[in-house]
Image: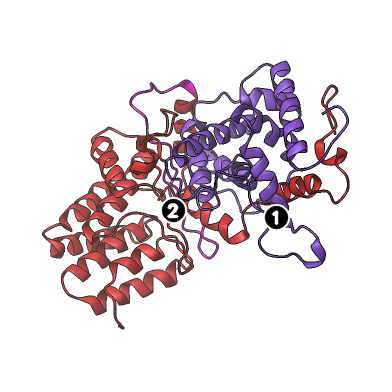
Chain colours: A purple, B red
Amino acid sequence: MRVATPANDNPPTGTGFSRDFRQIFDAHARFVWRSLLGLGIHDNDVADASQQVFLVLRAKLGHIDAGCAISTFVYGICLRVASDFRRRAYTRREQLCAQPPECPTAAPQDGIVSHREALRHLLAALDQLDPDQREVFVLYEIEELPMTEVATAVGCPLQTAYSRLHAARGKVARALGEHLEGL
Amino acid sequence: MSASGDPIRLRSMAAAGSLLERGIEAARTGGPTDEQLAALAATVLTGLGATTAALAHVAKSQVATAGWLSAGSAKLVVVLLATVAVGSGSVAIWHGTRPGSRTLRAASSPAHSSVATPVLKVQEIVTEKIPDPASEALAPALAPVRDHAQPAVKGETARVARAAASAPAQGTHDDEIPLLERANRALTGTPAQALALADEHQHRFPASVMDQEREIIAITALVRLGRAAEARERAVRLSHQHPNSVYQSRVDNILPPGRP
């Protein structure tokens, strides 16, 4: 389920290009931000990383065929930017929590795991995945793209995507204490 | 919702209320706050998120290029912003409007220089103004600055043609650009001259869509000339004409501290 974005009611202004880009931004900004978080970008970096995605997108926009799906393009850029950021983040250890979280520090009410803690657990589990597996997991399980789109965005054959997904699902489910059939 | 062959999604398989289900839900509903989104839009859609030095470099390499009508003005906006920022001693980085909010780093700052895609060069940065909700003064038709490492492709030519064709009636006159460029260059060393040129621009192009850029030059010149009160006056007028402008923080940085 994608977050609905408000229709752009502004009267057409500027060029077709700038209008298009604005529309693309409106349609994808939340997805980009969310995906980057899922792909392991730290809270402190996600604004920068999102900005980079759109800068790259805008730079390349003029070179895409009219028929190419913008969304797929955006996904691909997210993956690349996330990969770069993560690689560089390893040299900034003070900011990155590389280990899985300890037990939640703040006691939740009634022992119910809070939204934030559940997210932290999930992200920690994702951190343990191979980047290839993580990408497929995020695009399929969180952003809920169909696997054909996932494979295109990631740039691998569909079957490869399926097997990466399968591996990722098993690891994540086990890390979060779920034992599910077939995983 | 799954395509044939796609497995059932994990969150549907997980037990209700389980850590797995809640974790995935949290990830799905996470994302930027409205404020964060607006901040992101401000940088992305104005192209101000680039270092001064990088922009100045672009300016040097691009200004000499015989440009397209509208694209030329876009590049010059970059030039002006870059060099004005250099001249005023502030860095051309967009500042968040909330105190303590994170300054978005430039796309081409050293920390980002290792981004894999070769296309992410300063030359590719497009400048574009956010549609100002309170004003219909919008930037002239803009197009991406050309990356000399990659030959222009058919699509880009077509887009430039489209841009030129659909430029608003009060688009940028060819004469404006050299004038503003001279004004901007004059800021270093001859601010009085810069001010005179800015005023000449105002006289000759009263309805210019580059009025904000001109005013920034004028305000900077006034500050340099020690005429802070006039600088502030002009800044106040500018902010009335362009409320919520993304240039506001830049103007704030140019003005000396203290009360008018």
* Residue A23 in sight here: no
Q: Nearer the viewer, residue A13 or B168?
A: A13
Residue B245: within the magenta? Answer: no
Residue B108 position within the rendered picture, expressed as x and y whole percent measured from the top left: 36, 41
Query: How many labels, in total?
Result: 2
* Residue A157 in sight here: yes
In the picture, measured across the screen, residue A62 lies left or right of residue A126, that is left
Farthest left residue in view:
B189
Q: Which residues are magenta?
A: B127-154
In the picture, measured across the screen, residue B86 lies left or right of residue B245, that is left
Give the prevailing secondary structure in the magenta stretch: loop
Same subunit, tags 2 and 1: no
Read off the chain for label 2: B
Of the residues shown, which amino acid type is indicated by label 2?
Leu
| Inter-mark Cα distance, 2 to 1 | 27 Å
Q: Nearer the viewer, residue A111 or A162?
A: A111
User: Which label belongs to residue B104?
Assistant: 2
User: Which label belongs to residue A5?
Assistant: none
Read off the chain for label 1: A
Residue positioned 64% across, 30% down in the render? A72
Say which residue label 1 marks.
A117
Q: Nearer the viewer, residue A99 or A78?
A: A99
Residue B22 position within the rendered picture, expressed as x and y whole percent measured from the top left: 78, 50
Q: Quadrant of residue B59?
A: top left
Residue positioned 40% across, 61% down in the render? B247
In the picture, measured across the screen, residue B87 lies left or right of residue A33, that is left
Of the residues shown, which amino acid type is indicated by label 1?
Glu
User: Badge 1: how crowded within 10 Å, few (<14), some, or many (20+)?
Assistant: many
Please tell me whether mark 2 sits on a helix, a strand or a loop: loop
Residue B81 position within the rendered picture, expressed as x and y whole percent measured from the top left: 31, 53
